[in-house]
Each structure stands twice: as C-alpha cells, then as structure tokens.
Image (tube, rainbow, N blue to C red):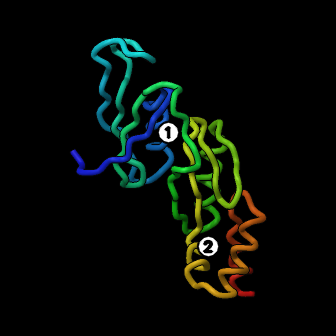
Amino acid sequence: MNKNTICLWYKGDAEAAARFYAETFPNSSVGAVQYAPGDYPDGKKGDALVVEFTVCGIPCIGLNGGPQFPQTEAFSFQIATENQEETDRYWNAIVGNGGQESQCGWCKDKWGLNWQITPRTLTEAMAAGGDEAKRAFEVMMTMQKIDVAKIDAARRG
C-alpha cells in the first residue's frame, strides 16, 4: 500500500472511470476492486465500493460514495503533453467521452473530474517569465484546448 494515495469520490461509477483513464493515459491501470460487505446509504452489498487505479503513475482510489460530494475545479489532474497531437488525443478522449470543454486547457470528464491538458511549451513559456510569459498567457486566455502553434508563436513574439 502506498503511503499517500489520492482518493476521488464518485457517485457510483468509479470502476468505469478508472477503466477509461487506464485506456486513455500511459502508465495507467486498474488494480483491485473492493466490494461493499453490506448495504450502505448509496449502495448495496456487493456493489463496487473502492477501486484502486493509477493515472500516469499516480496512485489513486475511487470511492463510490454517492452524489453528496461532486467534483469541483478545486482538484484537477494536469497532464503534460509534448505536442499538438498528444494534446488533441487526450483532450478529444475526455471531451468525446461525454466530457465538456472549459477554458485555458481545462476540460471535465463525464464523471465530473477536471483535467488540465497542458503542452510543455506553455509551461516553459510561463517559467521563462517576462514578456514571453505575458504573450503566451494572453494567447492562452483566448483558448479552450491549447493550440501549440499559437503558444509557440506568442513565445517568439
């Protein structure tokens, strides 16, 4: 067992979410599924209760706790991408599977979990600071999915 594991609350479909993440992202997998030993407020004995999974090497558990605590933008996975093709692949997988677009590289999967699909060029521009960061930031603020070519052009001035 890991010393620290991210626990994500789901309405009841943590296993489906974990399987989607494992199919979509590298170094991701589904581990053990623990079933409820008895009835509980939002489920029955034998329902999947806890699902162990890994997303891009990060250990997680999905807890099927019910609808009381929906996901918010206060938590997100940030996925670093190398190019437009990788950015498009992850963005389109999430949005195309019942998710929704947001702003500045953010999108939400159909389970309500938020994702930042962030090309490294954007992160590098922000780390550079100064005018380069300002130009990249201003262009990013006009986007939903990040356009790598536009970020690169902004970096150059």
Q: Position of residue 70 (x, y in %)?
A: 55, 35
Say which mark, if any, is on residue 122. 2
Could you tell me the amino acid type at mark 1? Phe
Q: Which quarter of the rendered picture does the N terminus lie within?
A: top left
Q: Position of residue 101 (x, y in %)?
A: 70, 48
Of residues 47 and 4, the one nearer the viewer is 4
Residue topped by disc 1: 20
- Disc 2 residue crowd, few under 14, some 14–19, many 20+, Cα 10 Å: many
Quarter assignment of residue 34: top left
Circle 1 crowding by C-alpha within 10 Å: few under 14, some 14–19, many from 20: some
Disc 1 from disc 2: Cα separation? 26 Å
> Which quarter shows the C terminus?
bottom right
SS for tag 2?
Answer: helix
Task: Name the mark nearer the viewer: 1 or 2.
Answer: 2
Choose top left, top right, bottom left or bottom right for residue 9: top left
In the rendered image, residue 12, in percent from the top left (x then y), is placed at: 47, 25
